[in-house]
Image (spheres, rainbow, N blue to C red):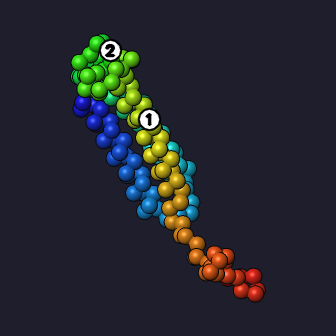
Amino acid sequence: MFAFLLSLGVTVGLTAIVMLYGNRRPVGTPLTWGEAMVGATVVFFIIFLIYGVVPHQWLAFADNEWGWRKDKIWAGPDTITEKSFGVDIPITISYEHIRDVIAAGIYIVALGAQIFLWAKFQNRGKTKPKEIETSAFGRPLVKAGGTS
């Protein structure tokens, strides 16, 4: 449990540090070779943690500490829990399946967060364009010279 939480905490902490540093740094400032190498190394380490170490630590924790193996059945034919669902379950769901679904969920959430954070980092410092006045029909009002 400690290894899983530590790897997740280090990943979140490093990501927060990178985002805080990126928001502090002025947009368009030239990057030195050394800064680029350090940044690339940190980002590679974060990606290594979230896609390699965190899911591995989850699988090891679920296997070793909680005993979520193939022989531990959660629901299916001939189990008491099937009565609580109110329907016959024609498949067997073991705790190993639940463990693997959670591991896949870690990957899915990490990918979504990575896409969101890259977009947020790339769009930092950009301002929204001014809204152009529109007519009652929703068309933009443009002056005779072609400018608004």
The location of residue 52, given as percent across then percent down, is 42, 30
Quarter in which the C terminus is drawn: bottom right
28 versus 118 height, above or below: below
- Between 109 and 134, the one nearer to me in the picture: 134
Q: Quadrant of residue 87?
A: top left
The location of residue 13, given as percent across then percent down, is 34, 47
The location of residue 40, given as percent across then percent down, is 51, 44
Dot 1: element: helix
Dot 2: element: loop
- Between 5 and 33, the one nearer to me in the picture: 5
Q: Quadrant of residue 142?
A: bottom right
The nearer-to-camera label among 1 and 2 is 2
The residue under label 2 is which amino acid type? Pro
The residue under label 1 is which amino acid type? Tyr
Q: Name which residue lies at 24% across and 30% down.
A: 1
- Between 114 and 143, the one nearer to me in the picture: 143
Q: Name which residue lies at 37% across and 51% down.
A: 16
The location of residue 116, given as percent across then percent down, is 48, 50
Q: Name which residue lies at 33% across and 18% down.
A: 76
Neighbour tally class for label 1: few under 14, some 14-19, many 20 plus, Cα within 10 Å: some
Measured in 3D between alpha carbons, the distance from the residue under mark 1 to the one under mark 2, in whole angstroms, is 30 Å
Q: Which residue is mark 2?
A: 77
Q: How many marks?
A: 2
In this view, the residue farthest toward the bottom is 144
Q: Name which residue lies at 45% across and 37% down.
A: 108
Of callouts 1 and 2, the N-terminal one = 2
Would residue 93 be seen by someone viewing this image from the given angle? no
Q: Quadrant of residue 77?
A: top left
Q: Which residue is mark 1?
A: 107
